[in-house]
Image: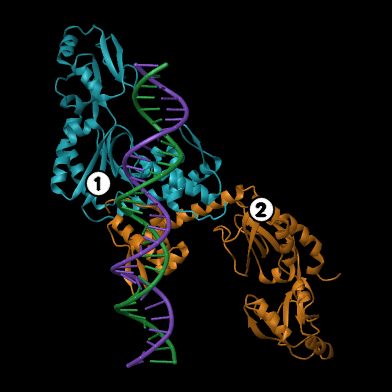
Chain colours: A cyan, B orange, C purple, D green
Amino acid sequence: MHAMDMRWDDLQTVTLLVRHGTLAGAAEALGVNYTTVARRIRRAEAAFGEALFERLADGYQPTDASRLIAQHGDAMEDTEHALMRRLKGREAQLSGPLTITAPQLLIAYVLSPLLDQFTRTHPQIDLRILATNELVDLARREADVAIRISQNPGDALKGLRLLEQESASFASPKWSALLQEAPEAMVDWIVYDVFPGVPKGASADYPNQRVRFRFDDMVAMAGAAVAGLGVVRMPMFLGRAMPGLVQVPVLPPVPYLDIWVVAHADVWPSAKVRAFVKPLTDFCRAERKRFVSDK
Amino acid sequence: MHAMDMRWDDLQTVTLLVRHGTLAGAAEALGVNYTTVARRIRRAEAAFGEALFERLADGYQPTDASRLIAQHGDAMEDTEHALMRRLKGREAQLSGPLTITAPQLLIAYVLSPLLDQFTRTHPQIDLRILATNELVDLARREADVAIRISQNPGDALKGLRLLEQESASFASPKWSALLQEAPEAMVDWIVYDVFPGVPKGASADYPNQRVRFRFDDMVAMAGAAVAGLGVVRMPMFLGRAMPGLVQVPVLPPVPYLDIWVVAHADVWPSAKVRAFVKPLTDFCRAERKRFVSDK
DNA sequence: TCCATGGCATGCATTTTCGCATGATTGATA
DNA sequence: TATCAATCATGCGAAAATGCATGCCATGGA
C-alpha cells in the first residue's frame, strides 16, 4: 500500500463489487459498463498495492482486504442515504420525482382515483408507483412514501394511521349458495402463506373446514376464489371490489391490520410528501365505509 | 433535485470546498487543479438542481444545502480514515511509507541516531518525519506514529511510556557566574507561553525573580538563553545537549512531562510500526540517564 | 492613483476514462 | 455431448474529465 491515492468513486466500486460478486452486477448498480468496474478495480488494486479480488470463472471473489473496504463503504453509503433523505426532506417545490409504494391490490381497487386526481393537481410532480407487497427500504430511498398494511409504522419512520379495516370470508356465488343449502358440507379454505391454517374465529355453523390451498399471493388467491376453488379470508374492501366474489358467513367480519402511510422521518417534511399525504388522508376518510362491515 | 445521479467524488469535492472556502484551497486538498473543483461543483449543482454556493469575490460561500452535504461528507471522510487506518494496521511488509512525528528538539538532540539506524536496518521503508510541536491528527492519518511529551497517550490511541524526565533551569555561562556571585541579583526568566509566570519550585536562594520574556517556541527560547537573555526552564536532555548552556541552580530538577510513543489503535499492530517502536524503546532505555538529574 | 495579490471564469489541447465489439472460458442444460 | 448462458479480458475509438494559459474583477496597500 503505497500511493494511497484513493478515490471515493473507487471505494464505492469496490464496495458494490463485493456486494454483488460480479462485474456485471456491480456495473448495473453503478449505472456504468462492466468494463469500467473492472478498470476501477484494477486502479484500486494498484493504489493499495494489493490484490482485492480473486478472478474466478463465476465472478470476483473478495479478499479480506476488500471485505474490509466494503464494510466501510457500506457505512459511507448509509451516510450518503441519510444525506439524500435530508435533502429530500428540505425540498419545497412541488415538482420532480416522488416515489410511492403500496400493495398492488390497494392501488388497483382503492387508490387509483386518488392517484389520478393527484397527478392532475400536480402535473409537475413525476409520480412513480411501486405496486408490490415487498417491503421497500425507505431508509435507502427506494421509495419516499409507503402505504402499508401493518400494526405500526416501524423504526425511524413517521406516519399516520389512515384506516382501520376488517376482513371477512369471500367466495364465488356458487360456494355461497352451497353454504346456504348445506352448512355441514366441507368448506375448502384458500389461505395465505403467512397465516397458515383455518382462520381463527370461524363460525361454528360450519363444522367441517379444511385448508385446501396455500398461496403466497393475494391476487392469485382472489382469482382462485372467483374460479370457485374455495373460500378466502380477505380484507372487506377487496372482497367487495372484486367482481365474481360475494361475502360468505363462514368467517364473520373481524378486525384486520390497519392501513398506514409512512415515510422516513427525514423525508416526511418534504413539500411533495405533504402534498401527497393530505389528500390521501381525506380520501381515506371519505372511503372509510368500504373497509368495515355495515353495522 | 431531479437526477440525483451523485458521484462520491463530487460529494467529497463539495465537502472540501465548504471546508476551505476557495476553489484553490479545495483543489490543493484534493490534489487537483482548481478548475476541476469548479467543474465538479457545477456538475453537483446540476445533479441537485440547486445552487450549492454563492460566488463571491473572495471565494465560494456555502448555502444551507452544501453545508448539509459537507456535514455528511465529513462523516464519510471519517469512515474513510477509519478504513485507511485499518488497512495500515493490517500491513505485514516492511516497505513503503511510514510517517512519524516528534517534537523538533527531541529529534534534533536525541532521536537522530535512532532514525539513522532505523533507515539503515529497513532501507525499503520510506520514513517521513514531521518535526513539529503541533499535535498532528493520528486519526486522520497525518502521521502513523507520534512521539509526544504529555501525561497520557490520549483518546483511541495505544502507546508506551518511553521515558520519565525532569526539567531544570539553564542559562549561559555568564549568567551562571553572575548567579554564583550575586544570588540577590534580579533573575530574568524566559518562559513558555503555556506556563506563564515564574516556574513553581524555584529556589529561595534567589529572592528576586521576574519574567522578562514570554516565548511560544522552545528553539527560540534556547537561542535566547544562549545569547544571555535570561534563564530558561527546559528538559534536562535539552539543556545538557545545547552547546552554550549550563545548568543553574535557580530551579532545582523537578519532574516534567513523560515521553510517550503512541499510534492509533487501528495502526498500532502494523509491522512497520512494530519495527519502529521496538528499537525506539530499546534506544530510550539506553539513553535514560540523559533525561534525569544525577542522583 | 497605481500596482500587487488573491480569487474566479473561459477556451483549448491533452490525458484519462468510458463504452462497445470481439473472443475466450466456464458451468449448467437439454 | 452439444449448446446456451453467464462471466471476464482486450483492443479500439468516442466521450468526458482534466490541466494550463489567459483574462477579468475586487481588495488592500504604497
The residue to which callout 1 is attached is A98
Give whichever of B180, A156 is nearer the camera: B180
**Labels 2, 1: front one:** 2
Which quadrant: the C terminus of chain A?
top left
The amino acid pointed to by label 2 is Lys
Element type at mark 2: helix
Quarter of the view holding residue B32: bottom left
On screen, residue A173 versus residue D23, left or right, reads: left
Give whichever of B204, B270 is nearer the camera: B270
Give whichever of C30, C1 is nearer the camera: C30
Q: Is residue A268 visible?
A: yes
- What's the residue at 48%, 44% (across, down)? A70
Element type at mark 1: strand
Q: Is residue B168 above or below residue A12?
A: below
Q: Is residue B175 above or below residue A9?
A: below
Residue A180 in percent (x, y) is at 17, 10
Question: From mark 2 to mark 1, how far is it between C-alphas?
Answer: 52 Å
Q: Is residue B95 above or below residue B163?
A: above
Q: Is residue A30 above or below residue A244?
A: below
On screen, residue B295 versus residue A47, left or right, reads: right
Residue D24 in percent (x, y) is at 29, 78
Numbered label attached to residue B147: none
Residue B132 in percent (x, y) is at 62, 69
Quarter of the view holding residue C22: top left
The residue to which callout 2 is attached is B272
Is the residue marked by circle 2 packed among few (<14), some (14-19), or many (20+) residues within 10 Å? many
Question: Is the C-beta separation of discs 2 and 1 under 8 Å?
Answer: no
Is the residue marked by circle 1 packed among few (<14), some (14-19), or many (20+) residues within 10 Å? some
